[in-house]
Image: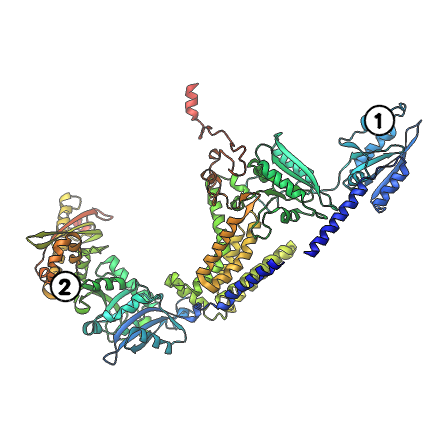
Amino acid sequence: MKRHIKAIFFIILLFQSLTMSGCWNKRDLNELSILSGMGIDMGSKADEITLVYQIINPSAIAGKGASSMKTPFLTIKTSDKTLFAAIRQGTRETPRRLYFGHVQIYIVSSEIAEKKGIKDLFDLLYRDHEIRENIKVLIAKKQKAEDILSTQSVLEINGGTSLLKHLENAHGSEGTVRPVEVREVISTLMNPTSGLVIPVVYLSPSILRSKLENLQDSVQKSVIKTTGFAVFKKDKLIGYLNPKEGRALNWITDNLIHTVIVVPYKGADNTVEVLHSETEVHTQFKQGKPEILLDIKMDANIGEVNAAVDLTKLSTIEDFKKYTNLSVKKDIENLIKRVQRDYKVDIFQFGTTLERNHPKEWKKIKNNWEEYLVDLTVKIKVNTTIKAVGMKNNTFQLKMEGR
Amino acid sequence: MAIWKWLHQFINRANDEEQEKDMVPLSKILENNLNEIQKDLGNSPDIITRRFILGREHKVSAAIIFTDGLVSNNDINHFLSVLFTEYNDEDVSVSPIKTIKEQLLNIGDVKEAEKKTEILDEILTGSTALFIDGAKTALIASTKGWETSGVMPPENQVVLRGPREAFTTNIRTNTALIRRIITSSKLRLEQMKIGNLSETVIGIMYIEGVAHDKIVQEVRKRIKSIKIDGILGSGYMEDYITDNPWSLFPQVMYTERPDTAAGHLLEGKIIIIIDGTPFVLSVPVTYLMFFQSTDDYYLNWQLSTFLRLLRMFTFFISLTLPSLYVAITTFHQELLPTTLLVSLAAQREGVPFPAFIEALIMELTFEILREAGVRMPRAIGQAVSIVGALVLGTAAVEAGIVSPAMVITVSMTAISSFTAPYIEIVTSARILRFILLMLSASFGLFGMLFGVMGIVIHMTTLRSFGIPYLQGIAPFNITDQKDVFIRAPRFFMNSRPRLFAQKNPIRQDSNIPHPPEDRQRRKQDE
């Protein structure tokens, strides 16, 4: 019996620990302000930054209460000297605890990136347990992050998700941008020889902030657009790449998934759709000078033929191949030239490849890498395989011309 | 403890008295015997004494005693008519008892009895006792024949393609049902009576040479050690013979299907049949046996395997889904995709209770509904389900007391628990679910994981008649895997489960060609 009393006492103690502990970090879903996007702007005072966050309003997005009359998210901004301090100020404005586990987008305004640099804006994201490291980073071109974060989109009403999908869509189909995550930003910043690029978004036109009419009109008065990349030297923004250059950059860094290439042939513009692209970067040293060879292999599909050509002939296909290769090669060469002339930053990550392939030689040139980069020889080899010509063989234009 | 001791003493004293009575022999005088017996049975009106005179020349008074309702009236009538018309008392050298027993009685099971207790037992189980004046023994004729329900289709363990027969409340019918399936002479039946007032007949069946001797012995020992006044059903036995009666997990399997029982016998298990119960117990059991439906062996093996895995999965669901939901939505929101999180958050908008209380309310409601549905007569049972589904489900959501997601969670849990082929396994999940719910509400997934770990540790400590409870997983054995998670095709099942039938593990000739030889080729050979 005594033994039983002990056992019962022990069980009671165990249950005490259950009930007394009181679920200290329990947070019910309706006690949370779920954030979907964050942004950084210049503060009103010189040493301050302004943090903008987008708080999801769940009942407007899902469930019975979902209606266009309610705003799908709130945009709040707070200013302080550090990021964390600004975040804590946010509690002054919301009834619910801010929850960062689902932040998907982190927008930095180009103003702060140009003037102050971005290095002070990332430690918290890396250190905090709640914030993910795979948040996608964006640059707001010549605008405030607030402008972009407060714009409502019609199709995907959840703000952060909308921007994220937007970015992924542009990356997946056209390849002019590519999502860059927080951890990539940090690891690139840690490497002094490589240059950072961050995809750029802007609101077009920038004057009009989102209003309800914007959601009711089929012609949207303000639209968020992605446009290429912002180029960083160290942590300062020094310039931009346009969409076409962005695509060339994705080709070099092997980040291209699909894209379409306009190929002029026989007096008409035709389209080739890239289905798969793979880039190998080969390196070698000639007389102490590094040389790069880009070997690009693409699978493509003839998507649109406006020239009156006979596609059933092998020579036509060969021509398509040749012009596609030329077009890609030209794009890439232009980009490399521009970077060598204007930016002088290794955004292609050639340095890391060199380091991996030739660690000894790399040590010698590492400190002067910028000088080597400016007149680096880059040979480009593009090899396209045309896999298909679509659902039709010859274009109807061939018959139009009576051939 | 004192109470226990006192009880033990009391029971022992009662046994001693029984034994004293047991010694009383019959007297030679008929009237004395009849009076004694009537007195012992308290002059009960359903004990019928029929006196008559036997013979023509040397007339002897005689009587039969039987219990009305337990005997077959046809048998009695026939018995009496034979005695009246064909009894021949010419030869005086032979005692009348012997004459009747050897020449006249056309009933299969006849024996002589001397002791009063034995006679009483027989009368009370449906036999007829014949007393003859001047004889020191009575003749016991088995005239059992009471009203029973016949062999009915099973009600609880329904299968798609198996036989439609279930055990009855009569032990003899039940043993016959099994003997009809396994006709081997190796099939053993041992019978004993348990319960000093009910004297319930208990049968132990096993196949000699297949079942493990030590397990048989252990079963016998455990059943014999039961000292109880009466056994009214199989549940009475369970607490006495299980290894760990404190555990929530079932350690005895019930079946109402003779084919399932026969299947168990063939695997080397031992079945216990209790008179008066249409459920037969089967020991030893392992945890994974409870996921093996009888249908698994009748349907094709691919489907059986899929369904078995599904049942295991749904058991896990029914055990953990509410706690998983509570843990994730209150502690680990980052585990959800954003869209789902937003949708769940929208549903919880305006719900006044924390998710844990919400889950508790819904789970309790479901348990109440379930209990109400079981206890109610079938006609009212439907009303219960309508009230439950409509009023509680829909109205609670519309009133904003619970979120729709919680209703989905609880319904999913409930439906999952209905897939179990043996209802006993669900009982453990029904209770453990609440414990896990509390753990996950306090510590999130960590708490839930600790709970599940605790359950697994507990299960590994369990044994059923010496067989580890998690046999198949915990003592992992590759040859047993053919019938644990998957149900392999028949031609791979060459051996019996290893620990159950160590004596005779070979089940079939492993050289059977499969698939059968090509018909075309055979024709050519001819």
Q: Which mark is residue B99?
A: 1
Residue B21, image x and y in percent?
Answer: 81, 42
Residue A163, compared with residue A251, is above or below; it is below
Q: Nearer the viewer, residue A86 or A13?
A: A13
Instruction: Tell me the element at label 1.
Output: helix
For the point 88% across and 23% down, the residue is: B93
Q: In the image, is A211 to the left or to the right of B510?
A: left
Query: Chain letter of disc 2?
Result: A
For the point 64% across and 40% down, the residue is: B220
Instruction: Tell me the element at label 2.
Output: loop
Mark 2 vs mark 1: same chain? no
How far apart are labels 2 and 1 at the CA level? 123 Å
Residue placed under numbered mark 2 in the picture = A345
Query: Chain letter of disc 1?
Result: B
State which quarter of the image contains the C terminus of chain B: top left
* Residue B331 found in image quarter: bottom left
Look at label 1 and name its amino acid: Thr
Residue A202 visible in the current orientation: no
State which quarter of the image contains the N terminus of chain B: bottom right
Q: How many marks?
A: 2
Q: In the image, is A92 to the left or to the right of B46?
A: left
- Packing grade of label 1 (10 A; few <14, some 14-19, many >=20) is some
